[in-house]
């Protein structure tokens, strides 16, 4: 069984133990845009889109660890910023619609033995209430920390402060409902190149999205020699521009392949969807000098 690497979100709980049972709980949350497995949990697919006649989908969960693990499944809402970073929200932005109230998930709690796998089913409901446009929520698979075994002794209490770090892992994956025809379009409104510290080839680009739905695809950067030969110097899969954002900025470090002179020639930037046909969504060329 093959698993795609999902987006990760990690929570670290820092528990400070004080004398006389006084304790404080500090929760630090960080989001990562790269796709990866987390906490011995693998999930596939990495995103689900309901459109047309599609009414259900299954996520495959697998525990790759050496201990049994329990995961609680819920929905969270995420806003993407212009720089591609994300944050949780409770209320939608203007022209943003949440999908969770139109979705059913079962089971909501899964316990997996080491190397065990199970499916979680997602179904779309209340389709008669959907208006034209796109609805998005993120399915969140959160691990449940193991309880302290019975009989385990408490840490002796003294006047000093002790710190115990308990990692609580989770994965959030987008679930999208699309109703009606898509009017989404994208182009590269800006693109610039520079040699960072005179040695690192860095490409900055700005995606400009319009229309009623998100875009999701792959970025390919080719260096074009003076003779017309194309050499791939950059490749990023799974780059999203979510609604309601109209702008997403992205920085890409290019390869430093032998024989490439970034002071001549040109760069061709292509953004294509992730379908088997790899349909081109936007393209831009820029001269290097």
Image (tube, rainbow, N blue to C red):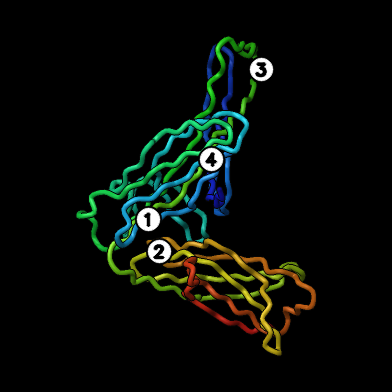
| Contact between labelled residues 3 and 2, with CB atoms less than 8 Å apart | no
Residue picked out by circle 3: 160
Residue picked out by circle 1: 176
Residue picked out by circle 4: 62
Q: Which residue lies furthest to the bottom in this view?
A: 227
What percent of the width, then of the height, locates residue 88? 43, 47
Location of the C terminus by quadrant is: bottom right
Q: Distance between the residues labelled 4 and 2?
A: 29 Å
Residue neighbourhood size for the residue with mark 2, other residues' Cα within 10 Å, grouped as few (<14), some (14–19), many (≥20): many
| Contact between labelled residues 1 and 2, with CB atoms less than 8 Å apart | yes
Q: Residue at x 52, y 61 (%)?
A: 238
Residue 75, visible in the rendered structure: yes
Residue picked out by circle 2: 214
Residue neighbourhood size for the residue with mark 4, other residues' Cα within 10 Å, grouped as few (<14), some (14–19), many (≥20): many
- Residue 67, quarter of picture: top right
Q: What element carries label 2?
A: loop
Circle 2 or circle 3, nearest the eye: 2
Instruction: Please tell me which residue lies in front, 11 or 83.
Output: 11
Q: Distance between the residues labelled 2 and 3?
A: 52 Å
Q: Which of marks 1 and 4 is nearer the N terminus?
A: 4
| Contact between labelled residues 1 and 3, with CB atoms less than 8 Å apart | no
| Contact between labelled residues 4 and 3, with CB atoms less than 8 Å apart | no
Q: Distance between the residues labelled 1 and 4?
A: 23 Å
Q: Residue at x 62, y 66 (%)?
A: 252
Q: How far apart are marks 3 and 1 (CA)?
A: 50 Å
What percent of the width, then of the height, locates residue 166? 58, 29
């Amino acid at each position: 069984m093959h698993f795609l690497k999902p987006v990760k979100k990690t929570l670290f709980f820092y528990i400070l133990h004080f004398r006389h049972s006084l304790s404080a709980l500090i929760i630090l949350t960080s989001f990562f845009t790269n796709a990866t497995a987390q906490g011995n949990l693998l999930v596939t697919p990495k995103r689900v889109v309901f459109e047309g006649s599609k009414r259900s989908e299954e996520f495959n969960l697998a525990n790759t660890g050496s201990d049994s693990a329990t995961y609680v499944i819920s929905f969270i809402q995420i806003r993407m910023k212009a720089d591609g970073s994300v944050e949780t929200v409770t209320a939608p932005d203007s022209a943003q619609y949440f999908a969770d109230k139109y979705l059913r998930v079962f089971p909501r709690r899964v316990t997996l033995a080491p190397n065990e796998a199970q499916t979680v089913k997602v179904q779309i409901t209340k389709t008669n209430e959907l208006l034209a446009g796109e609805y998005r929520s993120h399915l969140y698979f959160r691990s449940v920390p193991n309880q302290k075994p019975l009989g385990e002794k408490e840490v002796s209490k003294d006047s000093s402060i002790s710190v115990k770090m308990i990692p609580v892992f989770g994965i959030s994956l987008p679930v999208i409902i699309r109703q009606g025809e898509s009017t989404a379009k994208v182009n590269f409104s800006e693109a610039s190149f520079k040699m960072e510290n005179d040695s690192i080839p860095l490409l900055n680009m700005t995606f400009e999205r319009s229309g009623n739905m998100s875009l999701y695809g792959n970025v390919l950067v080719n260096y074009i020699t003076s003779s017309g030969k194309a050499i791939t110097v950059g490749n990023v899969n799974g780059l999203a521009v979510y609604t309601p954002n109209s702008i997403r900025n992205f920085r890409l470090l290019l390869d430093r392949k032998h024989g490439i002179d970034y002071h001549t020639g040109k760069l061709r930037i292509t953004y294509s969807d992730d379908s088997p046909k790899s349909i081109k969504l936007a393209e831009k060329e820029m001269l290097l000098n």
